Image (cartoon, rainbow, N blue to C red):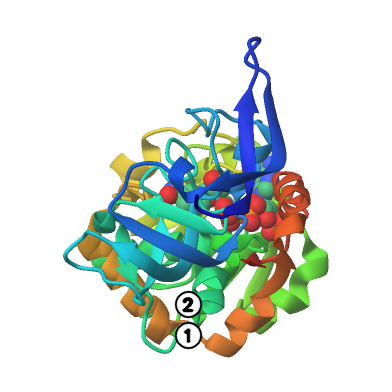
Amino acid sequence: MSESFKAIIITRDEDKKQSVAVGEMTEAELMEGDVTIAVEATTVNYKDGLAITGKAPVVRKFPLVPGIDFAGTVTESRHPDWKAGDRVVLNGWGVGETHHGAYAAKARVRGDWLVPLPQGMSARDAMAVGTAGYTAMLSVMALERHGIVPQRGPIVVTGAAGGVGSVAISVLSRLGYHVIASTGRTIEEDFLKDLGATEIIDRAELSAPAKPLGKERWAGGVDAVGSHTLANVLSMTSYGGAVAACGLAQGMDLPSSVAPFILRGVSLLGIDSVMAPKALRLEAWRRIATDLDHAKLATLSRTIGFDDIIRAATDIVDGKIRGRVVVEM
Ligand code: NDP
């Protein structure tokens, strides 16, 4: 009989009320997949917070181990690309939503979902980046594809002190962009400037209903917030600019008008990390290894243990987490 290991397990009762608890499971209880991995590090993303607190219907199969990303070492593989001992990273693909996820000592997934741990990065480094940081990189790459180079003008980053925001600031500043960080935590001004933000603005400037067009303030944006904030970011984007929309911390709605699109040629670039094709993932992780300052990564992340995951999940939904949280298993 295989040994049991600790796992966080989300269940749902007959009244569809969700509960979370630390339990035990065995390898035999892992779901279908052709690669088994010893999880070495994971993280707590905003989506994990929503899953664990049940504040949004992220988990769609019960019982389920949450946790949307991990880094670890392959222990068994029937997939041609992977063998025991390979170091791998996983983000998304429904892991932690419909497939048992990261908050257990072991995970079994499809080999097609995995990417190699980038050279020179530890499992901890990869999870300091995590899905939030990889999404930030996908956003930066989308702006670049749209021709938004540093010479075009400033880039606004919303939800700046959060996971996506803090990694986006670090990467953009390293690439030479003038970064305007929008935050509700002006107390974090020094932290954001150390990451590379040139200007800090209070998120209250962007959180009320937007005018169709505002003063042109930036060439582009990375928006982790959605709702009125995204509408304001669009209305203040200069002619021909682009905004990468990746989050919904303020809300899922977009109370905007078509004015920025039809009068200023502004583009809205959608970013999805969960089902992103493998080539894009490989490119994003390659760029993370080269374009993210590892010293900054250390300053924007802190480490917690397995037993702290549930509390961190509540904190992230309450907007109390600064930067990134790494879980060392
Ligand atoms: P965090 O909680 O770390 O960061 C979110 C930040 O948004 C907070 O730190 C806060 O920044 C800001 N914020 C929170 N509430 C509000 C509000 N009511 N109004 C305005 N700003 C607010 O989360 P992550 O960085 O991990 O994720 C950010 C968003 O991106 C989430 O919505 C998440 O679901 C989404 N996401 C999407 C992905 C995709 O594939 N598209 C992948 C990963 C994340 P501050 O304190 O600086 O104001």
Residue 174 got which mark?
Answer: 1
Does residue 208 appear to the left or right of 84 in the view shown? right
Residue 171 got which mark?
Answer: 2
Separation of residues labelled 1 and 2 (CA atoms):
5 Å
User: Which residue is at 48% across, 71% downward?
Assistant: 154
Assess mark 1: CB under 8 A from ligand 1?
no
257 vs 47: above or below? above
Q: Quadrant of the C terminus?
A: bottom right
Does residue 201 appear to the left or right of 244 in the view shown? right
Give the structural element (helix, strand or loop) at label 2.
helix
Amino acid type, residue under disc 1 in the picture:
Arg
The quadrant in which residue 18 appears is: top right
Within-10-Å neighbours for mark 1: few <14, some 14–19, many 20+: some
206 vs 61: above or below? below
Answer yes or no: do the residues labelled 1 and 2 have beta carbons within 8 Å? yes
Q: Position of residue 131 (x, y in %)?
A: 48, 59
The quadrant in which residue 162 appears is: bottom right
The one of 213 and 284 positioned closer to us in this rendering: 284
